[in-house]
Each structure stands twice: as structure tokens, then as C-alpha cells.
Amino acid sequence: MRFAKNLRGEEKKALGKKHLNHIICLLIIFCFSGVQAQNMENNNQGKTEGKIYLVPIGVIKGWILDSLDKQLKKTFKCKVEIHEEMELPPEAYNKQRNQYFSSYILKKLHSFIKPSRQDKVLAIADEDLYANGLNFVFGEAELGGRFAIISLARLRQSFYGLPENETLFTERTVKEAVHEIGHAFGLRHCPDPDCVMHFSNSLGDTDRKSMSFCSRCEQSLEKIIRHR
Ligand SMILES: [Zn+2]
Ligand SMILES: [Zn+2]
């Protein structure tokens, strides 16, 4: 419990930094559970120029990439391209934690793919990720930048010893992806608990969220896209 409180403090502190470049979507783990995800669907009216590249980090199953491809196209109204995979950088592995350092993978991604100014790059890793000061992260994005990463590891029911649920897993994955790309477009966390940009403290929060941007976030996204 104390540990969880400390993490919340760190989180608030980190998110409060004015010049924060990266928004980290962390989770507070309570014993057995605690996963976050985000939303999917979207009704935004804006026309997104540029492309979203999906970069598998190591091997990611085709159907997962196809689901993301399909949904992100719909959500952001832009082209989505599945890029060749980037090898999981072994030096990102922390043996003590048995996790990979997400910020390092993001850094490596910069030299692996050179998107144009209008493009976004979403890396998909099937490893458990962490960031400084956080016991794990579901994703990390450069706020208003081009690069983001999500981890699938904690989105599976099996991570918590529960029977697999492919539908739920896909929904969580898409939510997570939309949320992180939203950050890359410059959107911050939203107070509306139904909005895809709402911060989840737990996987339960994520599952409860809707799969859409709220009207405010939708308008902000359109504005951002118009002024790029
Ligand atoms: Zn976030
Ligand atoms: Zn919102």
C-alpha cells in the first residue's frame, strides 16, 4: 500500500513537470492485478496527413498488428503501415527487474526509422516494460512528438492467471495504442473517465473507459492536425 502511494506521488510529480517530453502511462500494481489500457474507436472528423507506422519490437503476431492497423486507420483517418520489425535491444533488459527499459527502446527507435514530420511511429513490444521511478508502464509517448511505444505483456488476462480473452486483449491493445498516439499528437490526460485519453490507474479503469475521444479531446486533436 505504501509502495503504491509512493508511486502515485512520483506519477503526479512527473506529470506535473512543465516541460515534460514524455508522458508515461504507468500502472500501480496491487498484488495480483493492475493493468491499464486505453480506448479505441473514435469519431474525429479531422483529416490526418501523414502516416502511422507500426513497428513490431521483436515478433508480434500478425492478427494483433492487423487489428491495430484497422482500428487506427479508422480512428486517426490516416494511412497505417506495418513496418519491418526492430530487434528487441538486449541492452534494454534489466535482469534484476526482468523487464525492458521502455525509454531506451524509444531512443533506439529514433535511429531505426526516420519518419517525416507528419508521421507517427508506434512500437509494439510483447515484453514487460518499465520507466524510471515506475514499477512498470503500459506505454510511453513523446508528447507532441513522433514516437510512442506500448507493451502487450500486461494486457493479457493470462498475466494475472486468468483464462485468455482475445476480444478483451484486442480491445485493450487498441485503447492503449490510441491513447499513446493521442499523446504523440500532443493530447494530454483528460479528466473525463470515459475518454480514451483518461489516465488509468488500473486495468479496471481502462476496461471501464469508452473507446472514444471525448468531444473536447476530439476537437483538440482536430485543431492540432489542422495547424500542423
Ligand atoms: Zn497517458
Ligand atoms: Zn478527453
Image (cartoon, helix red, strand yellow):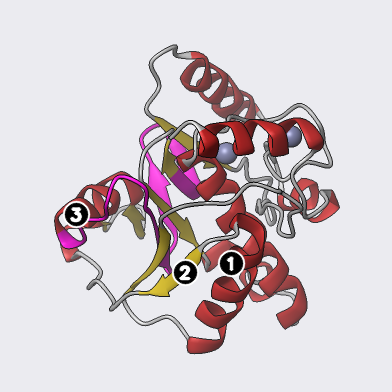
The spot of residue 161 in percent (x, y) is 69, 73
Neighbor class of circle 1 (other Cα within 10 Å; few <14, some 14-19, many 20+) is: some
> Residue tagged by mark 3?
108
Kindly identify which numbered label has been placed on residue 80: 2
What's the residue type where badge 1 is placed? Lys
Q: Quadrant of the N terminus?
A: top right
- As helix, strand or loop, the secondary structure at mark 1 comes to helix
- Quote the CA–CA distance across marks 2 and 3: 21 Å
> Residue tagged by mark 1?
73
Query: Is residue 141 in sight in this rendering?
Result: yes
Against 194, residue 40 (above or below) is: below
- As helix, strand or loop, the secondary structure at mark 2 comes to strand
Q: Is residue 162 magenta?
A: no
Q: Which residues are magenta?
A: 112-140
| Of callouts 1 and 3, the N-terminal one | 1
Point 48% across, 57% down: residue: 150
Q: Nearer the viewer, residue 184 or 101?
A: 184
Task: Answer with left or right where residue 35 lies relative to residue 228.
Answer: right
- Quote the CA–CA distance across marks 2 and 1: 6 Å
Against 131, residue 75 (above or below) is: below
User: Which mark's residue is nearer the viewer, 2 or 3?
Assistant: 2
